[in-house]
């Protein structure tokens, strides 16, 4: 995905994190999701048409569609007040695709930073599946994860590229450590969450799903 796309995605994820944390009004954030989602559908469509149809060109273009479709789906779900189960299943599918991108970044491109970034995104999409489809009450946790990722996987890397320092050895090394520590912290924090219980028809408590 282009670094301009990363920059715009950083803005969307930042606002989505504030929405999940109860700091921003949902409908206004939903409109912004749709606006950026449309942009990230139009641009990759154009790039796909003018590309040489090389498999790696299409591979990179497809990544932009993953983000654009997610933003559109989030925006429509919020504005229409949908239950989110469809968004959750879609997020699970995207999470699986993001794992493929993670593995490809390591095996084919030998790019550790990109692989860790995709792993971060895969984890976030999986959280949306847990929240929207399995109805886990973890919106506050997702908001915190999304807030951090909006900066460390999108906004700051884009700014590094604009400033011409993204490929320097020192920045790559530091960012590798940042992403590894972030992933470890996110996973450990999720494992510590005690999911709320709900009662079944007999009045007994069961694990909420």
Image: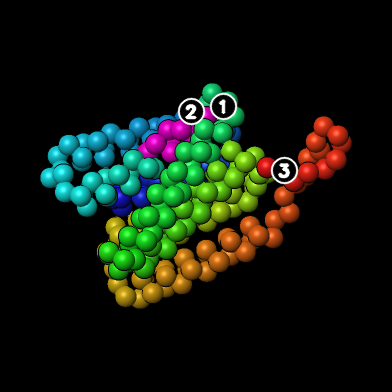
Q: Which residues are magenta?
A: 68-77
Instruction: Report whether residue 42 is seen.
Output: yes
Q: Which residue is mark 3?
A: 208
* Residues at marks 1 and 3, CA–CA distance in whole angstroms: 20 Å
* Residue at image coords 69%, 60%: 192
Image coordinates for residue 196, horizontal then vertical, percent: 75, 46
x, y percentage for residue 53?
16, 44
* Res 40 → quadrant: top left
Q: Quadrant of the C terminus?
A: top right
Residue 161, image quadrant:
bottom left
Cα–Cα span, label 1 and label 2: 8 Å
Q: Quadrant of residue 101?
A: bottom left
Residue 69 located within the stretch drawn in magenta: yes
Establish if 52 lies above or below 164: above
Q: Are marks 3 and 2 in contact (CB under 8 Å)?
A: no
User: Residue 56's x, y, as percent?
Assistant: 22, 52
Distance between mark 3 and mark 2 Cα atoms: 26 Å
Coordinates of residue 159 in the picture (x, y in percent): 35, 57
Q: Secondary structure at mark 1?
A: loop
Discs 1, 2 touching: Cβ within 8 Å: yes
**Residue at image x 78%, y 43%?**
206
- Between discs 3 and 2, the one toward the N terminus: 2
Q: Residues within 10 Å of mark 3 (few under 14, many from 20)?
A: some
């Amino acid at each position: 995905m282009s670094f301009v796309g990363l920059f715009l995605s950083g803005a969307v994820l930042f606002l989505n994190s504030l929405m999940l944390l109860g700091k921003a009004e949902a409908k206004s954030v939903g409109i912004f999701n749709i606006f950026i989602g449309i942009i990230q559908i139009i641009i990759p469509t154009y790039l796909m048409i003018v590309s040489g149809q090389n498999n790696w060109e299409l591979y990179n273009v497809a990544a932009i569609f993953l983000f654009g479709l997610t933003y559109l789906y989030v925006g429509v779900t919020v504005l229409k007040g949908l239950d989110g189960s469809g968004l959750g299943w879609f997020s699970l599918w995207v999470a699986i695709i993001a794992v493929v991108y993670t593995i490809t970044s390591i095996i084919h491109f030998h790019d550790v930073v990109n692989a860790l970034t995709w792993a971060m995104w895969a984890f976030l999409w999986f959280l949306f599946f847990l929240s929207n489809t399995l109805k886990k009450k973890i919106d506050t946790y997702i908001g915190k994860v999304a807030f951090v990722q909006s900066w460390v996987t999108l906004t700051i890397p884009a700014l590094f590229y604009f400033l011409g320092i993204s490929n320097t050895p020192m920045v790559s090394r530091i960012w590798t450590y940042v992403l590894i520590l972030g992933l470890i912290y996110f996973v450990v924090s999720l494992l510590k969450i005690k999911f709320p219980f709900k009662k079944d028809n007999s009045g007994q408590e069961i694990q909420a799903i």
